[in-house]
Amino acid sequence: MAYRLLWVDDEIDLLKAHILFLNKKGYEVDTASNGYDALDMCQSVNYDLILLDENMPGLSGLETLSRVKDLHPTVPVVMVTKSEEEDIMNQAIGAKISDYLIKPVNPTQILLSLKKNIHSREIVSEATQTAYQQNFGRLSMQINDSLTMQDWMDVYRTLVRWELELQDVAGDMKEMLAMQKREANNEFSKFVRKNYMKWMETLVHHEQDEARPLMSPDIFKTQIFPALDNGDKVFLIVIDNFRWDQWKMLQPEMAGLFNIEENMYCSILPTATQYARNAIFSGLMPIEIEAMFPDLWVDEDSEQGKNLNESPMVQTQLERFRRRNSFSYHKVNDSVGAEKFVQQLPSLMHNDLNIVVLNFIDMLSHARTESRMVRELANSEAAYRSITQSWFRHSAVSELFRTLASMDCRVVLTTDHGSVRSNNPVKVIGDKNTNTNLRYKLGKNLGYNTREVFEIRDPRKAGLPAPNISTAYIFAQNQDFLAYPNNYNYYVQYYRDTFQHGGISMEEMLVPLISLQGKKR
């Protein structure tokens, strides 16, 4: 396909060499010596790009640009002019020109601008696919050689980076990456199954172990308390059900506001609010919360909300470590709540620690399961990430972070767990008292294939409550979800390709732990 260009310049005869060069490169070039002729030509021809001089008699380049944009708002316009006046540059950039070249220009400069503004998508797509193809073998070796949690965090970072780079690229590479990610999650599950109970042994007994990763009960001790001891005012922002790839979508939005320090930590099992978030706020494993603060722990079979006692749990942790820090706790469920919280920010600075839980992404995940419309809007991983980005840009949460960036405080941004897109049903038999979560089950009469799940026969050793002596926990792995034999086909069809959490996958367990310091202090 030949691309068609329009070059508008009152000295067009002096540019014949450039035009011949472009012709040889396969471009069709029409010319005009003034803005009025250019506009007439734009009425009848759809150009792929317009090269435009600023200093022309009659209609100036900027005036021509304005009228061209009225006719064809999306056509790229490159200003090619002798003018080096800053005001002209600012006006041109404000009018959304695609490039600004100062005369005299050489043909290579023109060609580079054309490649950037016409061919960039194809060039980037081809280069990205080639780069991933070249790195495929190296990434496979990285997956096979991973022996520590840090190794697996590095693998996950790399996979997410390629997911983001390939998400807008057409071709087979995305499917190859998806296959490689499934392979990585299978190996990650084996790693967790092999090591999880060892980690729990040290965590439950509050022992130091360099082999154990940073986990949910460690967050306050390792991230919040040191910042408070440093004299910082700390805002802890917990975005429920927030994944690493979603953070990477928000990172560019944050980069202009904050100095960013990125880390990950490992969520405990089950990767669910009742367990993981309560472990963060209390600094304890669930079995310890149940034993020490029975009035704060809510059992699975209770109809009471499982996250209603988070503020008292924070208080117990501060008291247990003999800390006298003042704190506030807030839960934001909608835009109105976010706006109210932003308005409160100045008055909250008298506290040492302010905690806010944002529920949007978790609500999105559940709404996607229940609503056909939301499922269509978030019908892929890329779309799911995009909605997260749109929420951030167009909600009061964006204003929240902008305000915090201007305040003298440290922001710790994290989550309790992530979620995984589940599409492979695994049959489980349970009685009427078995919990309804699709990624983990607990009960005393569970029937399952031990090779398909990670089972914990003695929950106490994993820091988990056991309502009955014979209670066992089982966890789905990779992209599996747990389905009952009753109404099996309906159940599978309804829940396939939904975002779930509670089990073992990199997406659920390896979650963001981000430290933000405002640049405008």
Image (tube, helix red, strand yellow):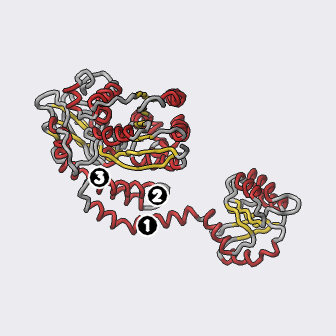
Camera-side residue: 214 or 350? 350
| Residue at image mark 2 | 165
Is the C-beta separation of discs 2 and 1 under 8 Å?
Answer: yes
The 10 Å Cα crowd at callout 1, few under 14, some 14 to 19, many 20 or more, is few
Residue 45 lies, in percent from the top left, at 74, 60
| Residue at image mark 1 | 131
**CA distance for labels 3 and 2:** 20 Å
The 10 Å Cα crowd at callout 2, few under 14, some 14 to 19, many 20 or more, is some
The 10 Å Cα crowd at callout 3, few under 14, some 14 to 19, many 20 or more, is many
Inspect the image, locate mark 1, and give the three-letter code of the amino acid beneath it: Ala
Residue 402 lies, in percent from the top left, at 54, 40
Tell whether 360 sits left or right of 102: left
Q: Residue furthest right?
A: 58
| Residue at image mark 3 | 185
Q: How many marks?
A: 3
N-term-proximal mark, 2 vs 1: 1
The C terminus: image quadrant: top right
Whether residue 168 is visible to the viewer of this picture, yes or no, is yes
Inspect the image, locate mark 2, and give the three-letter code of the amino acid beneath it: Glu
Question: Which residue is at 25% across, 55% downward?
Answer: 148
Q: Secondary structure at mark 3?
A: helix
Inspect the image, locate mark 3, and give the three-letter code of the amino acid beneath it: Asn
**CA distance for labels 1 and 3:** 22 Å
Vertical order, 38 against 299 (above or below): below
Question: Which residue is at 68% across, 61% downward?
Answer: 99
Vertical order, 303 against 59 (above or below): above
Is the C-beta separation of discs 3 and 2 under 8 Å?
Answer: no
Residue 450 lies, in percent from the top left, at 15, 44
N-term-proximal mark, 3 vs 2: 2
Within the image, what quadrant is residue 296 found in?
A: top left
